[in-house]
């Protein structure tokens, strides 16, 4: 590693063709996920959408439907990321997002609660298939000394997108025409994500001859056992999983906690979620400086 690479700002990666298109594709995807999901939860919380179920049950059901695909399809998604060229897979996934958002727009326009809940499951599914590609394509396009900074930027961008999407969802939930605006925005952002994905450089398939195994139980167990062979990798996986578990648990309950326990409006939800997202984004950027541009396990 030379001195120039150490002193170069991580933000310079945003000017490169090998990183910027992927960054913005990920950013638009995270924004859309959270605009869609939080618009649904906000409209349920403040009575615009009706479901016939208790609010707490609907919030938890929404979280379940979004997270369930990660349990069902993560093993398959990882195999596909190993077998096929990654930039092409990303374009297929972004194309699927456009279809989901078009259906979502119709459901928002006609206030179809259960249609939106089904599409929330499909959003979780496309996010599941994007995840392994997201983590595996970065090392193919960045040098070793750029990996920490690149990952920090992706994580920061993700949570800024979460923050903006969440704020937009809660702000629009107070507007009479909020559902109509959300319907338009999610489609436009999905198109932007697809457009930026067209510029992502190819990411070679490490195992093109891999035989796909579709059983989620056995393949997940196989993956866990394989990761346990390297203690540092296994602990890293556990740490990341625990982080997302806690994050999902807290974020799911914020809407009901704000309305029922705090007696607050959507502005209070925005304040709580903003503090959460800004803290994670700042921590991600700070990690790059603390690590000295080096990746170390343990």
Image: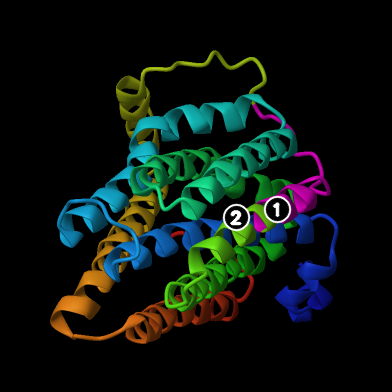
In the figure, residue 189 lies in which quadrant?
Answer: bottom right
Residue 193 image label? 1
Lower sequence index among marks 2 and 1: 2
213 sits left or right of 228 in the view: right
| Residue 190 counted in the magenta span | yes
Residue 133 image point, x, y percent: 60, 42
- Spot occupied by residue 256 in the image (x, y as percentages of width and height): 21, 71
Q: Nearer the viewer, residue 201 or 6?
A: 201
Q: Residue at x 69, y 29 (%)?
A: 205
Q: Nearer the viewer, residue 44 or 230?
A: 44
Provide residue 239's location: percent of width, then percent of height: 34, 58
Give the magenta part as a residue range.
Answer: 189-206
User: Can the viewer see residue 295?
Assistant: no
> Which residue is label 2 attached to?
29
Image quadrant holding the N terminus, namely bottom right
The residue located at (45%, 76%) in the rendering is 277
Point 42% across, 31% down: residue = 73
* Residue 265 x/y as whole percent: 30, 84
Q: Secondary structure at mark 2?
A: helix
* Contact flag, marks 2 and 1 (Cβ < 8 Å): yes
Please name the residue shown 83% across and 49% down the image.
199
Q: Is residue 50 above or below residue 276?
A: above
Categorize mark 1 by other alpha carbons within 10 Å: few (<14), some (14-19), many (20+): many
Q: Quadrant of residue 229?
A: top left
């Amino acid at each position: 590693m030379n001195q120039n690479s150490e002193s170069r700002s991580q933000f310079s990666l945003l000017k490169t063709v090998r990183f910027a298109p992927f960054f913005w594709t990920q950013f638009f995807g995270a924004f859309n996920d959270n605009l869609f999901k939080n618009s649904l939860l906000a409209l349920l919380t403040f009575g615009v959408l009706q479901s016939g179920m208790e609010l707490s049950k609907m919030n938890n059901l929404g979280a379940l439907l979004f997270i369930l695909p990660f349990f069902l399809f993560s093993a398959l998604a990882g195999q596909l990321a190993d077998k096929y060229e990654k930039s092409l897979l990303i374009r297929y996934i972004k194309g699927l997002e456009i279809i989901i958002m078009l259906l979502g727009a119709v459901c928002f326009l006609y206030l179809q609660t259960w249609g939106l809940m089904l599409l929330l499951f499909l959003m979780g599914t496309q996010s599941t298939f994007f995840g392994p590609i997201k983590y595996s394509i970065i090392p193919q396009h960045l040098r070793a000394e750029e990996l920490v900074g690149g990952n920090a930027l992706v994580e920061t961008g993700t949570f800024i997108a979460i923050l903006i999407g969440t704020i937009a969802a809660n702000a629009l939930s107070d507007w009479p025409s909020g559902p109509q605006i959300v319907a338009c925005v999610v489609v436009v952002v999905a198109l932007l994500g697809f457009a930026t994905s067209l510029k992502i450089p190819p990411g070679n398939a490490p195992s093109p001859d891999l035989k796909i195994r579709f059983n989620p139980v056995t393949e997940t167990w196989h993956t866990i056992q394989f990761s346990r062979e390297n203690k540092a990798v296994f602990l890293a996986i556990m740490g990341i999983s625990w982080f997302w578990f806690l994050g999902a648990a807290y974020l799911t309950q914020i809407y009901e906690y704000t309305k029922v326990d705090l007696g607050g409006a959507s502005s209070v939800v925005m304040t709580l979620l903003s503090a959460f997202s800004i803290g994670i984004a700042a921590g991600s950027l700070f990690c790059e400086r603390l690590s000295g541009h080096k990746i170390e396990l343990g």
